[in-house]
Image (tube, rainbow, N blue to C red):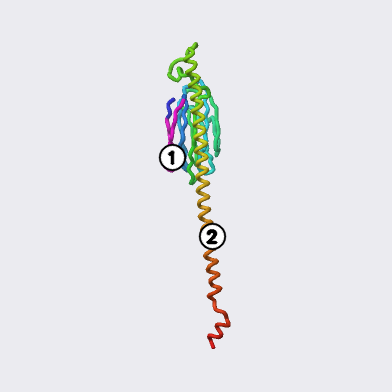
Amino acid sequence: MKTFIVFFFILGCNVKISQTFYSGGVALTFELGDQEKSCFIETFPGGKSYLFSYQVIRGGNNDVDAWVVSPNGKILYKEQRKESDEFRFDPSKGDFQFCFGNQFSTITHKVVFFSISPEEIDSLAVEAGDKKPTAQTLLQDACDEIHTAMTEVFENQVDFRLKESMGRYVAEELNNRVMWWSIGQALTVMIIGFGQVFILKTFFTDKLPSQNKLLDT
């Protein structure tokens, strides 16, 4: 499949993209700026079902708007401010748009992962551009089984990396908040300590009224 990427910028922010192709599908991670919309165009040959899934890795409340537009302009799928979702569809031949919007956010960028993959894994012969033979040899069957297993392993690795990235972000955010909370607590203790010392010092520096009278006489 050929992939074309089209960006619509509102604030003109830079977008970081990491893209991976596998077994007729595509997995992509990109940064979506605040008040920004990004659309990705995918060309489908038609004839089989696909699965579109996305996940907000980090940013704000981990939510984003998402919608899918068919070649004739019909909106097949639309959800607002969701963290993750899946959508199965049977595309006709043509260009489909997969769009994400962050217009509701004014200061927060989002990092979004999404993938488009066929529900059924094609054989090696089909992926090579040949027709699938009606009668395969034992070697061809073994190769197709290995190909299917390796594709599933790759998809599991993508899922584990996604969860690891989300977990790492949560851990870093927690560590950052704990650090600043500790700094605040340390400053509070120091201020209270200096204040107590200052107040205690005034008890010994103030002159008593009787002493003042003796000095006057």
Q: Residue at x 50, y 35 (%)?
A: 162
Q: Is residue 63 visible?
A: yes
Residue at the extreme top of the image, as rendered: 135
Q: Which mark is residue 9?
A: 1
Residue at the extreme right of the image, as rendered: 210
- Image location (x, y in percent) of residue 132: 47, 15
Q: Nearer the viewer, residue 67 or 146?
A: 146
Which is nearer the N-term, disc 2 or disc 1? 1
- Image location (x, y in percent) of residue 26: 46, 29
Local SS, label 1: loop
Local SS, label 2: helix
Looking at the rendered structure, the kind of residue marked 2 is Val
- Image location (x, y in percent) of residue 185: 53, 56
Looking at the rendered structure, the kind of residue marked 1 is Phe
**Numbered disc total:** 2
Quarter holding the C terminus is: bottom right
- Above or below residue 179? Residue 39 is above
- Image location (x, y in percent) of residue 128: 43, 19
Q: Which residues are magenta?
A: 4-22
Q: Is residue 73 visible?
A: no
10 Å crowding of disc 1: few (<14), some (14-19), many (20+): some
Give yes or no for contact between labels 2 and 1 (Cβ–Cβ under 8 Å): no
Residue at which label 2 appears: 189
Give the CA separation, mark 2 to mark 1: 48 Å
